Amino acid sequence: MERGLTMADTNGGIIGPDNPPTTSTQSAVITTFNSSGTLTTAAKTKELQYLIIAGGGGGGGHPVAPTYTVGSRGGTSSIAGTPITTVDTVGGGGGKTGAFSPSPSEGDGGSGGGGGRSPVGTGTANQGFNGGSGARANSVGADVSGGGGSAGALGQPWQPISGTVKSGNGADGLASSITGSSVTRAAGGGGGQYYFGAGRIGTGGSGGGGNGGNPANTVSAGSANTGSGGGGWADNVTAFNDFGAGGGAGGYRCSVPGESSGGGASAESTLTVVGSTEYTITVGAGGAGASAPASTSGGSGIVVTKQPAVDFVSGASGMWSLGAVYDNVKAGTWTN
């Protein structure tokens, strides 16, 4: 007996039980890298959002005459793999010190380190801002240093205050909610100041910047995994060369819609990626700072990725049995 077109009319002819297509969701996946590693994308992922912050610059100082120990630039952070073009950030610039020419500091960076006797460090376009300037005692009454630049603002230059002078504060960082909570990172370090007490020392910017210091006031490093600059150190080892500027924040790049990248830039485009694929994540170290009783190093960087949720359809396509094909061809009811 001919079977005809009697197979699973509501199932496209599939052999077996009725199996209509279903809609499913691959949940969002957020991954935080506090150190270098490998990201493996989920099976259905095609898009990747990111926050990439390089290591912060170390704070400057002048601890041993006539040596000008200065802040080193922080390390690069990045995402790399197929088919994307590597996305990387520039390490934060080191804080400057008393040497004038040539400047021994790696002051330029993602955000620039603060200035001492020499000019400020320059930030990288679309990643961070310049540092703030310092000034010499022969022009303002005491050696004062600038604060480090951040992802969000220029480092504060030295300040006249209450008949004296003050070293600049580190600039405040930028906030991102890529993890689901708002967190501020990539701040500048405060400038050191030997004279006039604690109120004349630059403080670190909001988001992890280190405080400036002197022998009576503890200096501090940039906070780990914020890419913030270290505080500058001043201890009057050599008179009239008493500078220790704050380190700059690591370069800051963000592709979260509605947020910002560093240096006043808008969010970048998200990455097009391939599911079930490995991507190399590099997290930059903080730059070394001046030798002091406490660390003046920049904070290490961070990389955070978000794979947005994906809706997809699953279910087997219809398939006719060989017997059904034969019967319908014989009956003249088969069409290609």
Image (spheres, grey):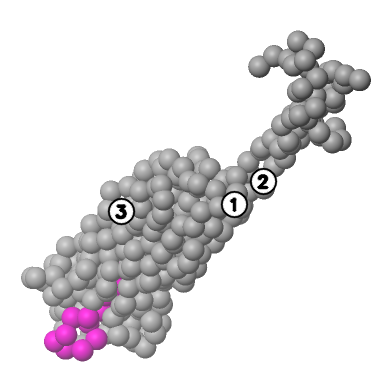
Mark 3: few/some/many CA within 10 Å (<14, 14-19, 20+): many
Q: Is residue 194 above or below residue 255?
A: below
Which badge, 2 or 3, is on the more N-terminal residue?
Answer: 2
In percent of the image, x 27 and y 73: which residue is there? 72
Circle 1 SS class: loop
What amino acid is at disc 3? Phe
Q: Which residue is mark 3?
A: 129
CA distance for labels 2 and 3: 38 Å
Single out the mark in the foreground, 3 or 1. Answer: 1
What amino acid is at disc 1? Ala
Quick one: quadrant of the C terminus? top right
Q: Which residue is mark 1?
A: 42
Q: Are marks 2 and 1 in contact (CB under 8 Å)?
A: yes
In percent of the image, x 41 and y 42: which residue is there? 268
Instruction: Look at the image and say whether residue 253 sits in the magenta stretch.
Output: no
- Residue 71 visible to an observer of this rendering: yes
Which residue is most to the left? 101
CA distance for labels 3 and 1: 36 Å
Q: Position of residue 306 (x, y in %)?
A: 55, 51
Q: Position of residue 123 (x, y in %)?
A: 27, 55
Drawn side of residue 250 relative to residue 176, left or right:
left
